[in-house]
Amino acid sequence: MSVFLYPQLPRYIDVRQVDVQRVYSDLESYTNELKFLLEQRDLEEQLRPATRFYPATSVTQIPQPNIGDIAYSTSSGRFWGYVNDVVRWQPFNSGIGNARGYYGSFYTDALLSVSANDQPVTVSLAYTNGSFGVSLVDGSKVTVLNSGVYNIQFSAQFLNNQTQLIDAKTWFKRNGTNIEYSAGYVAVPEKHGGIDGKIITSYNIMVSLSANDYIQFMFTAASVGVYVADLAATSIVPNSPAVILTIQQV
């Protein structure tokens, strides 16, 4: 821990004989140096690893926590850690038998189509169905906040408005770069009886990710007639989202 020696005001033998300009200059120098030292101390305090532990009924009762503070909530029976002023308190993994890994579930009901043959389409995910330690950035970037091995799975509801069978391709990117061996192919049935052909495809991959890495889901097709879209609910069956993507730490 740093030791700060704060400045002192000069002592004048006879104030009456001191020029006003000199007093002002001395005061200005004193306040500038004091301000600098206080700012340095504030910075050191902000960067200091927290060591405080709080027993509390609820973490919301704790005023002005520091990053790294730990609390035990008697109402939930869990330990919590203070991450930052944005994420705030997050529960610790509960351990064997009640472990909580990081996860995220996202989907979209938008219609996304290929604008040119074999042109890649980056899927934007419109909704979050639940997440812990995973966030959706810029619509398409499924971003993990912690390093680990993750299971990533998707389902895509493909449709085809052409009268011939058309191949569609899917794959994943990590930080903007294609993930090797992550692609899949599916033959989307042709339009028949005046109704667009449809098929749903799904598979999973296992990927090692570092903190703040992100995943994107991609697709393309051999013809502009292929697209993904939400299939509306009926009185019996719920919606079939255009794309669902889930990610879970393993």
Image (cartoon, helix red, strand yellow):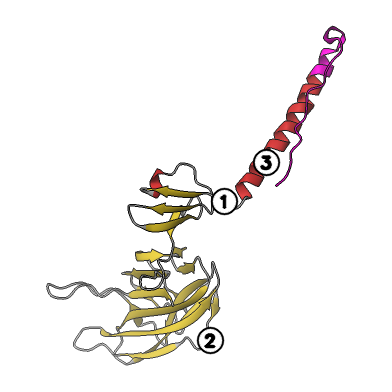
Q: Which mark is residue 180?
A: 2
| Residue type, label 3 | Arg
| Residue type, label 2 | Glu
| Residue type, label 1 | Ala
Write down the residue under mark 1: 50
Is disc 3 surrounded by few (<14), some (14 to 19) or many (20+) residues within 10 Å?
some
Establish if 11 lies above or below 45: above
List x then y, in percent, for residue 131.
38, 65
* Marks 1 and 3, the one that precedes in the sequence: 3
List x then y, in percent, for residue 44.
66, 46
* Marks 3 and 2, the one that precedes in the sequence: 3
Q: Where is residue 242, by image quadrant? A: bottom left
On whether residue 5 falls in the magenta region, the answer is yes
Q: Which mark is residue 41?
A: 3
Residue 121 in view (yes/no) = no
Q: Which residues are magenta?
A: 1-23
**SS at mark 2?**
loop
Relative depth, front residue between 90 and 216: 90
**SS at mark 1?**
loop
| Magenta stretch secondary structure, dominant | loop
Which residue is at a point 61% across and 47% down the rendered structure image? 46
